[in-house]
Image: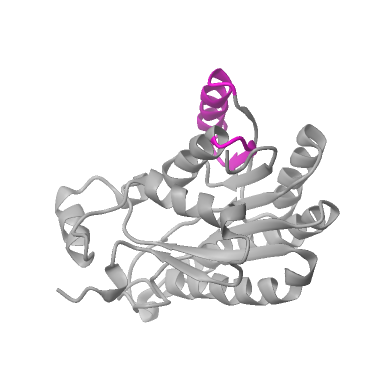
Amino acid sequence: MLLEGKTIIITGASSGIGAAAAKIFAAEGARLVLGARRAELLEGIVDEISAAGGEADFVAGDVEESGYAEELVKRAEERFGGLDGAFNNAGTTGDVGPIPDMEESNWHNVIAVNLNSGFYAAKHQIPAMRKRGGGSIVFTSSFVGHTIGLPGMGAYAAAKAGLIGMTQVLAAEHGPENIRVNALLPGGTMTPMAGEDPGYHELVRGFHALKRMAAPSEIAQAALFLLSEQASFVTGTAMIADGGNSINKL
């Protein structure tokens, strides 16, 4: 099992990619601390993992708050004895529209959820991993702001591109401590964030070379690789798992 004996934090774990990752990581032997705002959904996932013989706990809260990132780490240490990895996956697209027309509150919210949360996560997770002699951190970024500039998504692009820059610096700073840090860049994925409009889904499918959207489990499998020892010499990367979105023009 790729994560046997490892304790992993997952944020954005109540649905979509995070929920899929929780079930896959647990099946691979990880002990999990799950984070999101909706306690009832987290509790259901923990119950499902426990029924399958896995180990998981949860802390509900808001990734915009430094204290919440600290609380997730504290739970990992108190319940499972330490922290070996983290999939910092929580995010939001915010309102879509040109920057001159954008409400300042939207800009600040998107930056807080997508980028500030990454800072808080690293600030508290890295000292805990240092105690364990190493670890692995994965941030969910995006091809938006990295390989394309998608109109209407200026705040999202800025935040996700910022995560990649932070990833590179963290990897350089903490590589000597055997702490790997990588960013994962998914393509269009069938999550609640994608909505329920079939016309929109058809449009998004066409952006990809594979002419389909990802299942949440497919992105979770990419995160599993980055967190596992199979990626033991991989750090500081922006790993694209976008179904060919970045290279497709037709």
Let me know if residue 14 appears in the view: no
The quarter of the image holding the N terminus is top right
Measured from the top left, where is residue 228 in percent x and y? 59, 51
Q: Which residue occupies the foreground of this view, 183 or 95? A: 183
Q: Is 45 left or right of 149, judged from the image as shown?
A: right
Residue shown at 38% from the left, 71% from the top: 144
The quarter of the image holding the C terminus is bottom left
Measured from the top left, where is residue 54 in percent x and y? 60, 26
Please tell me whether residue 51 belongs to the stretch shown in magenta. Answer: yes
Residue shown at 37% from the left, 78% from the top: 147
Q: Residue furthest top?
A: 51
Q: Residue furthest bottom?
A: 100
Residue shown at 49% from the left, 44% from the top: 18
Let me know if residue 173 appears in the view: yes
**Where, by quadrant of the figure, is residue 56 drawn?**
top right
Please tell me whether residue 71 belongs to the stretch shown in magenta. Answer: no
Q: Residue furthest right?
A: 131
Q: Which residue occupies the foreground of this view, 247 or 205? A: 247
Q: Which residue occupies the foreground of this view, 229 or 135? A: 229
Q: Is 136 left or right of 70, judged from the image as shown?
A: left
Q: Which residues are magenta?
A: 28-53
Residue shown at 54% from the left, 73% from the top: 164
In this rendering, the answer to whether 68 lies above or below 81 is: below
Measured from the top left, where is residue 70 in percent x and y? 76, 50
In this rendering, the answer to whether 208 lies above or below 221 is: below
In this rendering, the answer to whether 153 lies above or below 243 is: below
**Where, by quadrant of the figure, is residue 113 drawn?**
bottom right
